[in-house]
Amino acid sequence: MSFADAHAFAFSLMVAIVIFRAGDGTLSVVPANEYDGDDTAIISEIDPFAP
């Protein structure tokens, strides 16, 4: 998933998301409240409700 797709995903669902680099090097997206991985793998966090 591209970074732009991840942003669109966050705003379409209207939930806070975490974009992280998976073990194989790809970018992945998950709702922030479900992420339980390594904090160093996080690329960005997007909250569509943040000002």
Image (cartoon, rainbow, N blue to C red):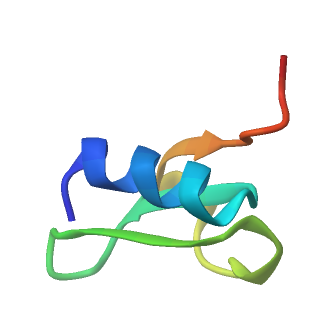
Quadrant of the rendering where the N terminus is positioned: bottom left
> Going 75% across and 61% down the picture, which residue do you hit?
15
- The residue positioned 26% from the left and 81% from the top of the image is 23
Q: Residue at x 75, y 83 (%)?
A: 34
* Horizontal side, residue 25 vs residue 33: left or right: left
From this viewpoint, which residue is outermost toward the front?
12
Front residue of 13 and 19: 13
Determine whether, in the image, residue 6 is placed left or right of residue 10: left
When the figure is inspected, residue 23 is found, relative to residue 50, above or below; the finding is: below
Residue 45 position within the rendered picture, expressed as x and y whole percent measured from the top left:
62, 44
**Residue 43 in picture, x, y percent from top left:** 43, 45
Horizontally, is 42 left or right of 2 in the view?
right
User: Where in the figure is residue 41, as x and y percent of width and height?
Assistant: 45, 59
Position in image of residue 32 (x %, y %): 73, 66
Residue drawn at 63 percent across, 42 percent down: 46
Is 9 left, or right, of 6 in this rendering?
A: right
Q: Quadrant of residue 29?
A: bottom left
Q: Does 36 appear above or below 21? A: below
